Amino acid sequence: MIPSLPRPRWLATATAAYLAAFLAFLFLPLIVVAVFAFNDAPYPAPPWHGFTWDWFLGNAKSNRVGLFKDTALLGSIWTSFVVAVWVTVLSVLIGISNAFLIERKNFAGKQVLSILMLAPLVIPGVILGISILAFASRVAEFVDDTFGLDWEYLRPGLPLVVLGQFSYIATISTLTISARLRRFDRTLEEAALNLGASRPAVFRTIVLPYLRPALIGSAAISFLMSFADFNTTLMLVGADAPLTVEMYGRMREGATPVLNAVSLFLMLASALLALGLMRGSPRNTGAAPG
Amino acid sequence: MSSVAVGSKWHGRLGLGLLLAPAILWLGALIVLPHADLAVLSLRERVGPRHYVASLAQYRTFFTEPLYWHVFVRTAVMSVIATFFTLLLAFPIAWIIAKLARGRSSSLLFMLCLIPFWVSETVRTLGWMILLRESGVLPSILVKLGITAVPVELLYHDATILVGLVYTSLLFMLIPLVSSLESLDNSLIEAAYDLGAGGFTTLRTIVIPHAAPGITAGCIVVFMLTLGNYLTPTLLGGKSSQWFTEQIYNQFITRFNWEQGAALGFLLLGLSTSLVMIGLKLAGQRFGDVMRRT
């Protein structure tokens, strides 16, 4: 069972075979997506018709709209990007604040609050979405009835999408940053204070650099999770669809290989992000946690 | 002296207030109040234009309309099956990563298993659709191999939905399993071997009890995510997917029947929470510990 014990030959062979089959299972869908981005055919399906760049570069003239000419798809990538930036900034900021609240402060109801902070991870994304949708519409109605104001951004749309994604991604950044702050050696801080540094200076020069890996890590995870979110987004989306919703719509209708092209683009982008993170910190290279 | 103490106390209060405000705003405005509002919504009935009365009608409809609870039970059962298969598939891999592979090759293998989950579920599901649809890769291979005469439709079956759900859940099972198996001392396994225990006995009496926290954590997370999944069942199952989240979507977005949708949402939340509680009770663990593990 473990290397230090004798293992029958058949077991070693079976283990290797299982591992190979498992990796094939893992990578087959991704390989297929990547390969059919270059197939010279109107649908992402076999047989192979030869290599083409059409699904990236094609325009109306060649009767094939490639990724770089598909304004709806490009627009949805931009929408996802903007949403993800907002969610990342908000989540990291509240993560820092919550980490200090949980790790450094004592107050009545702290236990309840820290349990409540975990709750968004247990609530299905669809329900987070509908509850925020219903609540926002009630607030909008209230504001309209009492003040006669029309708060446009409480209607389904990007501000609500940002809030919906933020509502659970904030938990993840809180957990990541608190875990790092918990291991911080407070004597460093005291030493700096004794040497006459002001509190803001200590925070900027001692605490923040120490937290840096957790900040970068939680920013990357927040960005990825926001970009990949579907459940919550679907409930709150308005006229501008982020990429996942746009892709979902097209997949239901049977889309052209331009979706493979955009998928390949996503794979390359996340591979770059992963590589960048690994260079930053040799340890801690897990993907998004639950 | 005392003025300094008062000053720092005041300073502490201000600091606490500043740190509490964002947390309370987040949890209050985005979690607590919306769910309270959803509860109110689910407990009322529309009797006229802009006129509502408190009633249990929405919940009653759920029990009297066979379609709703049918889909509800189906979603729960399929989620349990998917969780079980995810555990079955992931356990040997977690064992290889934690125990058989060493040093660099172990972390490399772990990384390799995590890579597919850096891209979104949408992309992975697209891959499965290209593989499994009637004009897709696998059916045409089956024809070439002479196993089937004509291409068969491999999408839109329950088994397809399960494959998709298991695939998309593997990551959340692997991470807690690997970390709980890594902490198992090899000498315990060697001792069991020296005392004459076979592989199965060692697994049952040493490995599984030790890995139980990881197994519970993985199963709970996978179950929750599967129950709440929308994308995989609707795309791989098509019209026959019959997933409960889809019912909620239909009520809320398509039919604009928010009262009914809210009630269905609460039922899903109740199912998810109660099964998580049962799982924790069975394994004798606390919720916070489980969440920290993943």
Image (spheres, rainbow, N blue to C red):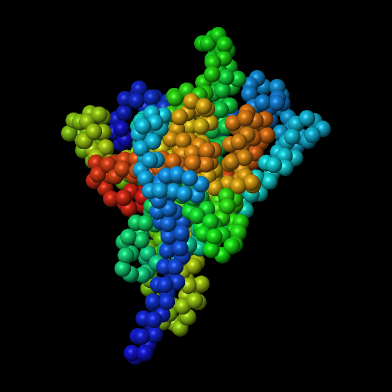
Q: Position of residue A22 (x, y in %)?
A: 45, 30
Q: If the image is split into quadrants, where does the N terminus of chain A sit? A: top left
**Direction from residue B147 to residue B278 in the image, left or right:** left
Q: Pick whichever, A227 or B255, lies toward us.
A: B255
- Residue B256: tell me if it is visible: yes
| Residue with the most extreme right position | A61
Q: Position of residue B140 (x, y in %)?
A: 58, 17
Say if A187 sits above or below A33 in the image. below
Rendered residue at 44%/41% (across/down): B260
Rendered residue at 48%/32% (across/down): B233
> Residue B31's image quarter?
bottom left
Q: Position of residue B155 (x, y in %)?
A: 52, 23
- Residue A279: tell me if it is visible: no
| Residue with the most extreme front position | B48
Rendered residue at 32%/53% (across/down): B288
Say if B17 sits above or below A73 in the image. below
Q: Pick whichever, B41 or A49, lies toward us.
A: B41
Q: Position of residue B223 (x, y in %)?
A: 38, 38
Rendered residue at 26%/37% (across/down): B208
Say if B79 sits above or below B284 in the image. above
| Residue with the most extreme left position | B195
Q: Pick whichever, A265 or A232, lies toward us.
A: A232
